[in-house]
Amino acid sequence: MGDHKEQPLRVGAAVRRRRRALELTLAVVAERSGLSVPFLSQVENDRARPSRSSLEKMADALRTTAVELLAAADPACSVDVVRAECEPGPEPSTRSLVRGHHQMHASEFTGDHDAGREFQYRNDQLMYVADGAVEIEAEGRAYRLGRGDTLYLTGGVRHRWRATEPDTRVVVVAVAEHIEAVRDRPRR
């Protein structure tokens, strides 16, 4: 019970990701597949489930296979529990807090890591210090964060961080890299 693998798959997001990766419009996929634009839109928005035959037509139009689209599909469940694996050990570790291919990604970092490594993500992220303390260098400034503190970074900001206390745990929540988050354009 509660296992996301028991749920049906939502293939719409996989179809949309593949179509966008190929830089195709719905009209082009409709023409190639013989399916209608409204139907394809409903599939991409998970308002319609394609038959096996329709899925194969979409896959052909997207130069892939139905099996590949299903493998890239998201579970349809809206709730998924990721249990703690075990108590953190003395070695630095990273664990994903979100399973699957979703719009949000979250990871927990325990201990220290390569403090010289610079990060730059395409989309926004939030860093939360669950335990311990960190020092983060971003935009030419150093920020010291302790337990319970957060730091928000917009997409594209280069940064690096390091733990300044043993047993530090940092949770990083970010908009997934496959999402094209569009910033508000300045008003004229």
Image: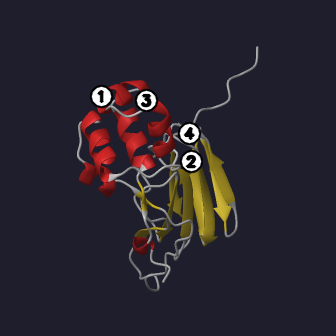
Q: Nearer the viewer, residue 25 or 34?
A: 34
Mark closest to the chain's N terminus, 2 or 3: 3
* Residue 76 spot, x, y in % from top left: 49, 62
How far apart in space, not on screen, are marks 1 and 4 (Cα)?
36 Å
Label 3 packing within 10 angstroms: few (<14), some (14-19), many (20+): many
Per the image, the residue denoted by label 4 is 155
Per the image, the residue denoted by label 3 is 26
Q: Is residue 86 above or below residue 106?
A: below
Q: Quadrant of residue 173?
A: bottom right
The amino acid marked with disc number 2 is Glu
| Tag nearer the camera, 1 or 2 | 1
Per the image, the residue denoted by label 2 is 137
Q: Quadrant of residue 27?
A: top left
Instruction: Identify the secondary structure beneath mark 1.
Output: helix
The amino acid marked with disc number 3 is Leu
> Which residue is at a point 39% across and 47% down the rendered structure image?
14
| Tag nearer the camera, 2 or 4 | 4
How far apart in space, not on screen, are marks 2 and 4 (Cα)?
15 Å
Instruction: Identify the secondary structure beneath mark 4.
Output: loop
How far apart in space, not on screen, are marks 1 and 3 (Cα)?
10 Å
Q: Is residue 179 above or below residue 103?
A: above
* Residue 133 spot, x, y in % from top left: 61, 67
Mark closest to the chain's N terminus, 1 or 3: 3
Per the image, the residue denoted by label 1 is 32
Whether residue 182 sits left or right of residue 114 in the image: it is right
How many marks on residues? Answer: 4
